[in-house]
Image (tube, grey):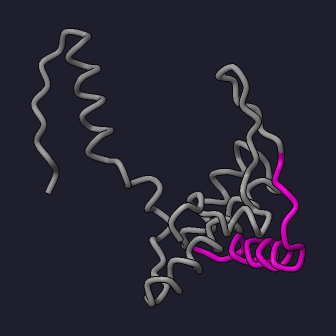
Amino acid sequence: MPGWPRRWWVAWAGVAPAIHESAGRRTPAGARRGNKWLTSALVEAAASAARSKNTYLSAQQARIASRRGAKRAQIAAAHSILASAYYMLERNEPYRDLGSDWLQHRHDEAHTRRLVAQLERLGHTVVIDPAA
């Protein structure tokens, strides 16, 4: 839908985080009120996904819950579930789980470059030999 903001459906469902921004400062404002039946179903599905083992959603929830708390992690996972469902329906594709280690390995090359640059700034010569 041209003209619609990106991911408007998660805001309609009530699982998109709201942000108040003024003078360059951003403050969290909870989530907007959405479809209460859809929101509760998504949060229930997110709670179930947190109890599963070796999945992307359980890893995402564990990662966010350690920093922000369990309830916010459930809302974030509900957001991911709805976004995944929308794209699966839009593209007519089956669900593919990214795996529990995807969040840790998604930027390995960039992390390596950043560490090498940091060592070179400290005056070390770095030769990288990747492990087999």
Q: Quadrant of residue 21?
A: top right
Q: Quadrant of the C terminus?
A: bottom left
Is residue 97 positioned above or below 116 on the image?
below
Asked whether 45 or 23 is in front, the reply is 23
Does the magenta segment cover residue 108? Answer: no
Q: Residue at x 76, y 75 (%)?
A: 42
Determine whether, in the image, residue 1 is placed left or right of residue 50: left
Residue 79, image x, y percentages: 67, 65
Residue that sits furthest to the top in the current view:
123
Whether residue 74 is visible here, answered yes or no, is: no
Residue drawn at (74%, 40%) of the image: 19
Relative to 119, is 100 on the left or the right? right
Residue 108 image position (x, y, % from top left): 31, 47
Residue placed farthest to the front in the image?
3
Q: What residue is rendered at 56% in x and 59% in y?
A: 6
Which residues, given as a range, are shown in magenta? 30-54
State the image quarter where residue 20 is shown: top right
Q: Is residue 12 visible?
A: yes
Say whether residue 44 is left or right of residue 95. right
Report the residue at 59% width, 62% height from top.
4
Q: Nearer the viewer, residue 34 or 4?
A: 4
Q: Is residue 49 above or below residue 61?
A: below
Magenta stretch, main secondary structure, is helix
Q: Which one is nearer the viewer's eye here, 5 or 102? A: 5
Q: Nearer the viewer, residue 129 or 85?
A: 85
Residue 101 percent across, percent down from the top left: 45, 62
